[in-house]
Image (cartoon, grey):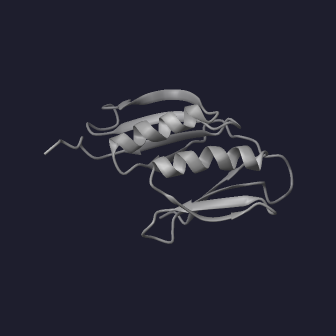
């Protein structure tokens, strides 16, 4: 359904450092980074899309965050949710809700919420049941 998501940022190097850590925790890979534009994009290792992109706004005006906007990124498991949230906070993000079950969404919804260094709100979540040790 989604081709790509683009988050406008003002400080590319800070955003790139932040999102590189979060995307690594989610096991996503860097598809490109063009510092001269500046913009960068990540994707799942086994698919060309969807893309998650960060960069300066095309119109050249400062980026701004929207009230009520949030992007939710799918994590492969609950451990990745925990790791992505920890990486976000360790690299300039702010907590908007720690990792945990949110059964009011559905019984297996495990998510965490944070803001990037520019104030954009993100969620990382897993919809699968907890994995049990064999």
Left or right of residue 76, residue 67 in this image: right
* Point 36% across, 45% down: residue: 126
Direction from residue 109 to residue 61 in the image, left or right? right
Displayed quadrant of residue 104: top left
Reply above or below: 100 against 70.
Answer: above
Q: Position of residue 78 (x, y in %)?
A: 34, 41
- Viewport quadrant of the C terminus: top left
Find residue 112 and report its horizontal and vertical position in percent. Answer: 45, 34
User: Above or below — where is 90 with respect to 75?
Assistant: above
What residue is shown at x 61% (from left), y 36% (from top)? Answer: 91
What residue do we see at 76% from left, 42% from top? 64
User: Residue 56: x and y, percent?
Assistant: 78, 54
Q: How many marks?
A: 0
- Seen from this angle, which residue lies furthest bottom? 48
Residue 74 location (% of width, % of height):
43, 50
Q: Residue furthest left?
A: 134
In the foreground, 132 or 111: 132
> On the image, which quarter does residue 133 sit in?
top left
Residue at the extreme right of the image, as rendered: 60
**Most foreground residue, 36 or 49:** 36
- Residue pictured at 74% horizontal, 48% vertical: 13
């Amino acid at each position: 359904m989604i081709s790509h998501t683009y988050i406008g940022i003002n400080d590319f190097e800070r955003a790139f450092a932040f999102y590189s850590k979060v995307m690594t925790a989610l096991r996503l890979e860097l598809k490109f980074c063009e510092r001269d534009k500046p913009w960068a994009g990540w994707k799942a290792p086994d698919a060309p899309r969807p893309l998650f992109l960060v960069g300066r706004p095309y119109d050249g005006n400062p980026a701004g965050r929207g009230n009520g906007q949030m992007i939710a990124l799918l994590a492969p498991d609950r451990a990745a949710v925990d790791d992505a949230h920890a990486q976000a906070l360790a690299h300039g993000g702010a907590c908007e809700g720690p990792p945990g079950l949110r059964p009011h969404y559905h019984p297996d919804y495990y998510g965490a919420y944070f803001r990037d260094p520019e104030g954009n709100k993100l969620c990382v979540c897993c919809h699968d049941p907890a994995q049990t040790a064999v």
